[in-house]
Image: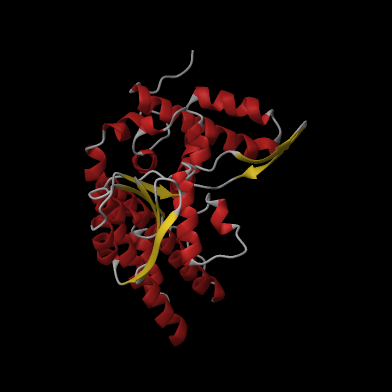
Amino acid sequence: MLTIGLDVHWRTSTICILNEYGKKVKELTIRGDWNKVLTVLAGLSEPFQVVYEASCGYGHLYELLVKIARRVVVAHPGAVRLIYRSQRKNDRIDAQKLALLLYLDQVPPVHVPSLDVRQWRSLVECRQNRIAQRVACKNSLKAILRSHGIRLRGAWTRKGLIVIAGVELPPASSLHRNLLLEELGNLTRQIQLVTVELDKIARRHPGVALLQTIRGIGPRTAEAVMAYVDTPQRFGRVNQIGAYLGLVPCQDSSADKNRLGHITRQGPATARKLLVEATWQVIRHSATAKARFERIAGGKKERRKIALVAMTHWLSRVMLAMLRSGEAWREAA
């Protein structure tokens, strides 16, 4: 069976082909879209396995390749150290190194979700981006009002927005205020539209309802975790969810020395952010979580952030265990 390494881009792609003994037999650069690459690969007379790095559109390319290849592996870009730590790097060398790693079965793979799950994740990210834009818009409005000595309470209610729109300001500030109010209204409507669609998707996934049995976990956190976990069985152990979400500490261990640093912050940032925010609510509403948090914090104010991260890591493991077993949340005795 042939082993093929692909270094794909939108306009040019490089192909490196190894034979069954790991020797390079062909190398070529194709100018054009991915359809030309697929045409070349489909014309091979022998079965083949193929590898490429995950990038924009990697899921679509995966669905096209699985139709013609015996095995398709998508490599994690940040974990392929043989490539990103190399002093000499170009498309031809990258394709050859990817092919060699696949031949040796040493490719760090990424999970490729289905099209529906990819669209679900896209909507989750879309809503979070719109919320971040809305927060920035509100902060800009606050800055304009404060620059003229105006401070309002309940500014983001319907009555508050009417008051902001009626405040007398200089022409330049008034124009800026009106543009921000229009943008704020558009963003709010967009968030509502995305939320309605997310609610429809969440109702079709029993895992979302299962995660909401945890006191303090709402639909937005539950759907984000479910969307990025996708298939709970793909994790060999429950502890692996912490590394996937970037909640484990950086580690530098050698012999009898073991240095631990900040959390890695790898993986889906949106799911991690929502999970950290929701952990405060879980601590507040769940006696089990609160007791565990207080034990880790040890009554010390400077340890509360450490305890929060530890609780988020613990909560992610609990969620994965629930999804694997189908068992709802229950408080400890």
Residue 155 visible: no
Q: Nearer the viewer, residue 224 or 83?
A: 83
Outermost residue, bottom side: 171
Q: Position of residue 144 (x, y in %)?
A: 50, 74
Outermost residue, right side: 256
Q: Nearer the viewer, residue 308 or 184?
A: 308
Q: Position of residue 21 (x, y in %)?
A: 44, 46
Judge from the rendering whether residue 125 lies leftward or rightward of residue 291; answer left or right.
Answer: left
Q: Nearer the viewer, residue 122 or 234?
A: 234
Q: Nearer the viewer, residue 60 or 187?
A: 60
Question: In this picture, is 29 found above or below 82?
Answer: below
Question: In this picture, is 185 found above or below 318?
Answer: below
Which quarter shows the N terminus?
top left
- Residue 184 location, quadrant: bottom left
Which residue is rendered at x = 52% and y = 70% of the image? 143
Which residue is rendered at x = 64% and y = 28% of the image? 296
Which residue is rendered at x = 28% and y = 52% of the image? 65
Q: Position of residue 91 (x, y in %)?
A: 47, 66
Which residue is rendered at x = 31% and y = 57% of the image? 191
